[in-house]
Image (tube, coloured by chain):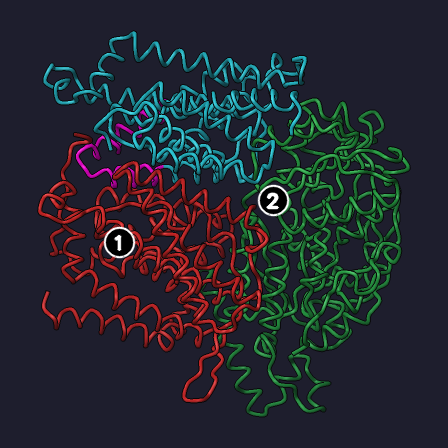
Amino acid sequence: MPSLGLFLSQLFNGLALGALLALVASGLTIIFGTLGLVNFAHGALFAFGAYAGFVTYGLTHSFVLALAAGALVTGLLGLLMEWSLIRRYYARPPEDQILVTFGIGIVIVESLRMAFGGLTQNVPQPAWGRGILNLHYFFYPVYRLEVLGIAALALFGLYLLIYWTRLGLIVRAGIEDPLMVRMLGIRVPRVMTLVFGIGAVAAGFAGVVYAPIVSAAPDMGSSVQVQSFVVVVIGGLGSFPGAVVGGIIAGEILSLTSMFDPAYSDVALYALMALMLFVLPRGLLGTEGRG
Amino acid sequence: MSRLRALRAEGIVLAVLALLPWVAPALHVPADVLTRSLIWGLFGLGFDILFGFTGMLSFGQAAFYGTGGFVSAWLLTSGTLSSVPLALLIGMAAATAYGLIVGYVSLRRVGIYFAMITLAFGEMSFFLENSPLAAWTGGENGLPGVPTPSLGLFGHVYAVKAGWPLYAFIATIFFAGYVVARRIVASPYGVVLRAIKSNPRRAPAVGHDAQRYKLSAFVLAAAYAGLAGGLLGVFQGYMPPDAFFLSTSGQLVLSTVIGGRATLIGPLIGAFTWIDLRSVLQQVPHLGAAWKLIFGAVFVVIVTLFRRGIFTISWNPGDVHAVGVELPSD
Amino acid sequence: MARKDRRVPRDAARRDFMRSTAGIAGGLLAAGLAPRAAQAAPQPLGTWPLGVTGDSVFVGVTCPLTGPYSAAGEDHKKGYELVIEHINSGELAKHWHHLRGKGVLGKQIRYQVGDTESVPNPGVQAQTRFITQDKAIMITGSVNSATAIAIEKLAQREKVVNMVGASGSNDTTGKDCQRYGFRSQPSAYMAAKALAPVVVKEIGKNKKVAYLVPDYTYGESVFDSTSQFTKQDGGWQIATKQVVPLGTKDFSSYLLNIANSGADVFVNVAFGADCVLSTKQAKQFGILEKMKLVVPNISPFQAKELGAELMQGVYGTFDFYWGLEGRFPLAKFFVAEFEKRYHYKPEWCAHIAYMQTMLWAATVEKAKSFYPVDVIKTLEKTSFSDTTLGTVHYDAATHQLVRPVPVVVGNKPSAMKHPDDYYRIAGLVPGAETMPPAGFFGCKLGSYT
């Protein structure tokens, strides 16, 4: 049996991992909830954010600015994606929507590869993130602890946006009844562009936050994307609380399984997803009638 | 479609496959590129039935490609079996069985969920191959040393050598797979599949158990994938773990859409395009890694503007394709 | 466009072959096959003689230009660029007496570099193309053992000589060894046998060790050999062994297991970007403060990426270090030429490319033939003097190069004499002392034809 210290540290690590996955998945779920579209370029946006952060850090040597710029630039890319291509797809079958985002994802990732090369790019930890914390039972890097806090704050920000603003009201109304929203005279196309941008911001922001841990690489988003898919399947696609709960569950499974045999940690995650599909096909907090 | 017209398409494919060994060298296309394309084409036949005709977009086909490939390769390299065709059949059967399980679970959700779930199962299969099953699959090493087939014909044993002989072996299998796929698509069963695609909600209403039809299409696609995977190992003398990669599933989707969905031959055309493009671009300095960027951009354009792929633009533009105009959700 | 240009010699080669088989001896003489003409001419084998009828020969090179090994792959590629230029121009022949004049047997070397993407399949795919399409007379290059072994088996099947690139696994010249494959990098066994006495002496006896092991043939090899020799020489025990998939980005859960294992020594077997990332993260988890770091096979650019602060006091081995320039004149030439052209000191992947190609060229010169059987037999019995590593030879039973193994330790930043002075050579262990007993890994080389 693993020691108490190891168990607690893995439990904690799972939380940190899960918070990040929750952030990525919430972007995915907001886009789906409002636009009815699964963004297969989400992992690419995650990587794009990390690179935007890397470039900003190189110019300014400020991690806070890197974080802001990474999120913002990725958001702009999201707006551009929606405005130029994605909006042409709302009337087309879901398969086509997946295909076009999948294709855009390839273009983004390969463009990053052309621009920066296949090598990983080092994004240093901010000065306030260096060092190790003694948490009595175990040691934990300060930065990873802060990642947990940053991700939680970002999720809270998204929550406020969705539940306490006019835009959020439209977004939630759009999830319930898109036709009614349109009939009320709300300029839906603009809202849709904005929502896609917000989803992209979540992915890009997470990318910058993660960059000091894993370094920026063109294909860094692919495993995150698959894991965030699992998160939304577990939590329920289109549900914001579902993304948070699903993210933490996924993080814990990845982390706790690795105590026994790391070879099985990813397998366990997918096995849980399969099990969920049997027990609760709509996910923990999924809404009825979707998909 | 009249019977004669049906045979015409098959005749053209047969003639092209048969003539290629004489035509291709003049065009500087090596047997290697063609054989590899045929394997992808066979892989794509099943996928096209699933996606092109039934409308189910799976991002996890690598799971079955890899399963068929590794089961066949393991049987041959471990000394359990010496007959390549038998090993291929068993690999195909294993992929089919695995397809039945994955399909049963994945089909609990349709549409958008289906693409995500199959993607996740594809990844799960990769991780299974990679670590827990590494004793059999070689993990990240894969299985080297897969033999080429020997065929017994009228008492003579003919060893199929790499190059054009192996091309002929794989082209024969591809053609058989193509004819079978054509028959399936043209049959009443195929009509139901298309009905499911053009209107997922109406098909069950007219009395077809859509779920069972979908599952059967999924299993069929897995069988084709398994056979193709087995052939990959035989062709290269090496079964790579790459067969299970996410990018393998993605590449199949790319080839099928670029070549043309619901054409059966489209995936082959698409695969040939990228394999050839890749090998040409690799010879140009600084452009080696660009093939995928170009391919991705072409893909976006095709998905947006030419919904039926490059193959059908030139071949049968008049054929009306049911355009599903649907709201993002109900 | 590039494609069209490349085809011309191929068609010309075919015509030449037709002529030569029709009995015109000129083609054969030009192809350097004269000694054979007197004997019964051998049957065509692999890409021979089709690949050698023109005035140039083709060498198929594969390097990981993308993926986790792309940094090493880029270095590897530069080594090939440099050596082929040096052979073609006759520059190397001026500094190394095993070569003569320009090219190999008077033929210029053409080559192409295929991207392995750091995984086996694209490498096999590219080399298959080089063999069938370009009639490559030799194939070479790889920066990982899974790729190296897959290519070695392809070489055996297609009967084309394979000068294996960077590959540290015991299997490459062990259970997966091939008659057509030759490897110059020290095997994991050799590296561990050279390293163990040094680390036991420096770190002490009876330590508990945590291993981070990448999940493929190389990782298992290094783990087996390192744990075996450190146990044998110093009674070191395994505290934990964490097996990680290739290309892992976030090592946190593995590192937590290591941090909690109570080990005194952290042996990081991961390679390339994986090693850099995992070491960086190990530092974040405070592991490097608690444990001594040993890297049995130090990756190219590792010190540059991690910085001297982190690499000081780290023990390890590798194929080649530019600091060997003081010991071998040819190493000095290689390092100087490389730096002149690429503006940094060569890493060891470049050295493997340089050395393997050079040894092959010298062998062909000595055999006076490209015929694979002649080349292999000559490689099996030749001792090459004055190389970049002094005198070396391939072990005839396993095709492992018997060569000295450098053991190094990371310099303190204050002890560095210039920016590239990352390591001090703690020992240069003679190759013969590090070789496994005959038959230890069960190598069976397979047939010549």
Tag of residue A19: none
Q: Amino acid at mark 2?
A: Tyr
Main secondary structure type of the part rendered in magenta: helix
Q: Label 1's element? A: helix
Image quadrant for the N terminus of chain A?
top right
Would residue B193 be visible to someone looking at this image? Answer: yes
Q: Is residue C139 magenta?
A: no
Tag of residue B216: 1
Identify the subunit bearing mark 1: B
Q: Where is residue A155, by image quadrant?
A: top left
Query: What hue represents chain B?
Result: red
The residue that mark 2 highlights is C69
Q: Is A22 located above or below residue B247 in the figure? A: above
Residue B162: x percent and y percent? 49, 73
Q: Nearer the viewer, residue A78 or A270?
A: A270
Q: Is C47 located above or below residue A174 in the figure? A: below
Query: What hue represents chain A?
Result: cyan
Identify the subunit bearing mark 2: C
Residue drawn at (49%, 57%) of the image: B283
Q: Which residues are magenta?
A: A75-104
Residue A262: x percent and y percent? 58, 36
Residue projecting furthest to the top: A164
Image quadrant for the C terminus of chain A?
top left
